[in-house]
Image (cartoon, rainbow, N blue to C red):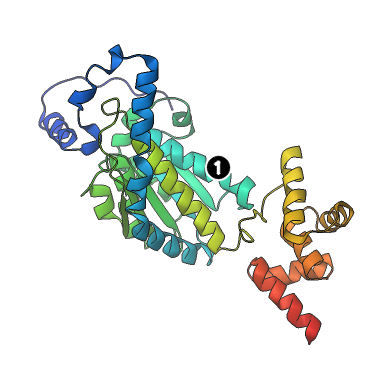
């Protein structure tokens, strides 16, 4: 999609309304105390920026109960075969695409299980197509192509909480019975109000006025980390804190797979190599064969019967041995 042409400036009712809206947003607020920042030594600027960044985890911590409630609702639907879909524009959209793209290698999810939609399409990931964020219709079209079901979850992501693309995505998804989450960095946002689960992480004004790729972007990344990672933990994609569903697609990940089996089982290198070979590289299966003292086909069956939860499959293996 080509870049959109620049819009003419003017004082139309819409222009005035948007200006007034931005004036009211915490993320757009001006910090007079930082007005001379460009005259400071580099180390002083870095110290100021680091101090600002240090406030973000506390802002996220204040919203942990609503984040946890959203995760439980997402996991419940994904356990039934639903998808997790992020929708945003600009930095928010790119963060959603990033989080979605990291789920297949980390948790062995199918490419269609966790998806990131960004206003303007794939080109917008690396090229600024900021005007696309103003189109709720574009969000409806993007989601319409995915044939949403009530088991799906759509997470609208927007620092301001007013982005039409993110709000349009959430409204469209709710109309079709899907679960909706609105992640914003301003209080009383339209995005959070439109969603089943509104998560508003208020990080305050940015070091550079209005540059919401900074604290707001960090806050969004932290919350998206939680949404995907803890959902995957709930779905049995980990064993303790081990990535037992990791997909070994390169040398580093093959080495990591071997190490994960070693940490989980304490087996020798030879035993681990044999188990991984018999399991066709599937870490969960290899661990189950070693800890459950069973063969790979049986381990695969037990995992399937227990929806991929390794602890439950291990318990089933132990019961089978004693019966």
* SS at mark 1 in the image: helix
**Above or below, comparing residue 70 to residue 91 in the picture:** below
Q: How many labels does the image show?
A: 1
Q: In x, y percent, where is residue 158?
A: 33, 41
- Judge left or right: residue 7 versus residue 299: left
Task: Looking at the picture, tell me which residue is in the foreground, 150 or 273.
Answer: 273
Determine the residue located farthest toward the bottom in the rendered image. 323
Residue 214 seen in the current view: no
Q: Which residue lies furthest to the top in this view?
A: 39
Q: Point out residue 137 in the picture as x, y percentages from the top left corner.
A: 32, 42
Compared across the picture, whether 246 is left or right of 217 comes to: right
Q: Which residue is drawn at 28% across and 52% down?
A: 192
Place residue 7 in its image quadrant.
top left
Question: Residue drawn 29% across and 31% down?
Answer: 206
Image quadrant holding the C terminus, namely bottom right
Q: State the quadrant of the N terminus.
A: top left
Where is residue 53? Give x, y as percent. 37, 35
21 and 61: which is toward the camera? 61
The image position of residue 241, as x and y in percent, is 61, 56
**What residue is rendered at 47% in x and 44% in y?**
116
222 sits to left or right of 199: right
Left or right side of 187 for 139 = right
Is residue 307 in view from this perspective? yes
- Within 10 Å of the Cα at label 1, are there few (<14), some (14-19), or many (20+) other Cα atoms? some
- Residue at image position (35%, 47%) is 58
Report which residue position mark 1 lands on: 101
């Amino acid at each position: 999609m080509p870049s959109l042409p620049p819009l003419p400036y003017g004082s139309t009712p819409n222009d005035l309304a948007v200006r007034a809206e931005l004036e009211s947003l915490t993320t757009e607020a001006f910090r007079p105390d930082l007005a001379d920042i460009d005259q400071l030594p580099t180390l002083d600027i870095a110290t100021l920026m680091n101090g600002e960044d240090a406030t973000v985890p506390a802002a996220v911590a204040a919203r942990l109960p609503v984040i946890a409630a959203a995760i439980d609702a997402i996991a419940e639907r994904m356990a039934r075969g639903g998808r997790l879909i992020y929708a945003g524009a600009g930095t928010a959209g790119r963060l959603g695409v990033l989080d979605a793209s990291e789920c297949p290698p980390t948790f062995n999810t199918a490419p269609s299980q966790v998806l990131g939609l960004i206003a303007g399409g794939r080109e917008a990931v690396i090229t600024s197509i900021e005007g696309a964020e103003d189109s709720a219709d574009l969000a409806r079209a993007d989601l319409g192509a995915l044939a949403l079901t009530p088991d799906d979850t759509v997470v609208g992501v927007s620092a301001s909480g007013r982005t039409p693309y993110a709000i349009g995505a959430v409204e469209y998804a709710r109309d079709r019975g899907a679960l909706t989450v609105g992640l914003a960095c301003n209080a009383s946002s339209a995005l959070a109000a439109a969603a089943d689960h509104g998560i508003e992480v208020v990080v305050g004004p940015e070091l550079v006025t209005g540059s919401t790729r900074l604290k707001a972007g960090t806050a969004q990344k932290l919350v998206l980390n939680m949404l995907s990672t803890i959902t995957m933990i709930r779905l049995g994609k980990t064993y303790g804190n081990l990535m037992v569903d990791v997909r070994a697609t390169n040398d580093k990940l093959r080495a990591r797979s071997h190490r994960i089996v070693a940490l989980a089982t304490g087996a020798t290198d030879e035993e681990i190599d044999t188990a991984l070979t018999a399991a066709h590289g599937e870490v969960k299966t290899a661990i189950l064969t070693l800890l459950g003292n069973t063969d790979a086909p049986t381990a695969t069956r037990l995992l399937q019967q227990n929806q991929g939860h390794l602890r439950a499959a291990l318990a089933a293996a132990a019961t089978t041995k004693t019966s």
